[in-house]
Image: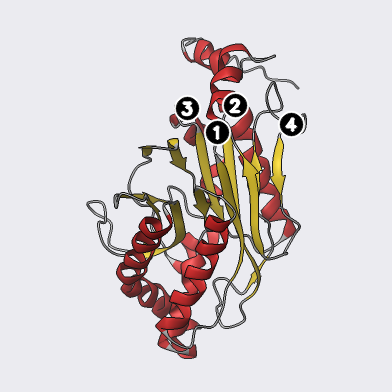
Amino acid sequence: MKIATASYPLDVLPNWSAYEDKLTAWVAEAAGAGAQLLVFPEYGAMELATLAGPDVAGDLEASLFAVADRLEDADALHAHLAAQFGVHILAASGPATSFLPEGVTRPVNRARLFVPGGAVGRQDKQIMTRFEAETWHVAPGGPLQMFDTELGKIGVLICYDCEFPLFGRALMEADILLVPSVTEALSGYSRVRIGAQARALENQCVTVMSSIIGDAPWSEAVDTSVGAGGIFGPPDKGFPDTGVIAQGKINQPGWIYGEVDLSAIAAVRADGVVLNRRDWMLQDGRADPVTVVTLT
C-alpha cells in the first residue's frame, strides 16, 4: 500500500469553507498520488480555534473548548472525504470533550481514524507532556486500542506516547503504528522520531510519524513547531538498511509518501536477521528480579 504522512502547517481560517477547502485539497492530493492511508498530525485541529476569532484562539482554555465544539463537524467532513476518495484517514488530533472515560472531566487529546465504509475509531493520548499536564490541563483519555482494517492492523501512539516502549509492546500485533506529533524544537522532534524508529525495531512493524510545522503566532499552545513526516520500518530483510522508508525535510510542508508491503512485515517477523518481536516474547516469560548492586 502507499502511505501519505503530513508535514502540516496551521492556518488562520476565515470561515468554515476555508477549512473544508484546505482539508479537501490535502486529501485529494494524497488520494490522487495513490495513497490509501493518510496521516495528519497531533493538535492539527487547533487551527479550528481561529474560527472563533483571535481572542479565543490565543487563549489556552478557551481554545480547547472552541476546538472541541467543532470536532463533530470536522469528523463529518473527514468521514465524507474518506468515503469520497476511498481512503483511510487519521484525522489531526485535538481536544475532545465527548465519549470521555469515567471520572475524566477535562478535555482529552484525541485522534480519530476514518475508513471508507463509514466506521470511525477513536484513540486518546495516554500520557501528557509537562505543558499539557501542568499548564494546559489536558487529561489522559481512554485506553489503547488496535483497529483491524482492510489495510491491516493499525495502532495509534500520539506523540509522547511513542516514547514509551510498553505502549508499543501493548500494540505488538499491529502491522502499522501511527504517530501523529507536534514538537516545538528539533530536540522534541528527534525524541519522537527516535521513539517511532525504536517501536518499528522492537515490534518489527512500520511506524508512520506526522508533524505540525511552522509558526502559528495566534496560539500559545502550538505557536512554533519543528518537524517532518516520516515512515520507518525495521532495518532488516525487505526494508531499507537504515530503516527509513521515507523522510521529509524539516519544516517543508506537504505529504511524504512511502510504499509498505504487509507481507514484508510478516516475513521479517518470521525470518528476519534478528527476531526482536519473538525474543521479547521469550523474555516476557522470565520473572527473575533485577539484582541491585551497590557500588561504593
Q: Residues within 10 Å of mark 3 (few under 14, many from 20)?
A: many
Which mark is nearer the camera, 4 or 2? 4
Foreground: disc 3 or disc 4: 4
Of 5 and 128, nearer the camera is 5
Q: Are marks 2 and 1 in contact (CB under 8 Å)?
A: yes
Classify mark 1: residues with Cα within 10 Å, few (<14), some (14-19) or many (20+).
some
SS assignment at label 2:
helix
Q: How far is disc 1 from disc 4 in space, using C-alphas?
A: 22 Å
Percent across and percent down for residue 15 are 43, 86
Helix, strand, or loop for circle 1? helix
What residue would you read off at disc 4?
240
Residue extending farthest left: 102
Distance, label 2 to label 1, CA atoms, is 8 Å
Image coords of residue 213 (percent x, y): 65, 66
Label 3: element kind:
loop
Give the camera-side residue of 78 and 143: 78
Residue beneath the point at 48% across and 76% down: 21
Q: Are marks 3 and 4 in contact (CB under 8 Å)?
A: no
Q: Quadrant of the N terminus?
A: top right
Among the two numbered marks 3 and 4 on one chain, the one whose residue lies closer to the N terminus: 3
The part of the image, by quadrant, that contains residue 187 is bottom right
Q: Secondary structure at mark 4?
A: loop
Which disc number belongs to residue 202? 2
Please state which amino acid type lies under the numbered disc 4: Pro
Looking at the image, tell me whether mark 1 or mark 4 is earlier in sequence order: 1
Estimate the spatial distance between the alpha carbons at disc 3 and disc 4, rounded to whole Å. Answer: 21 Å
Which amino acid, by three-letter code, is at mark 2?
Glu
Q: Which residue is label 3 attached to?
A: 172
Residue ID for mark 1: 165
Quadrant where the C terminus sits is: top right
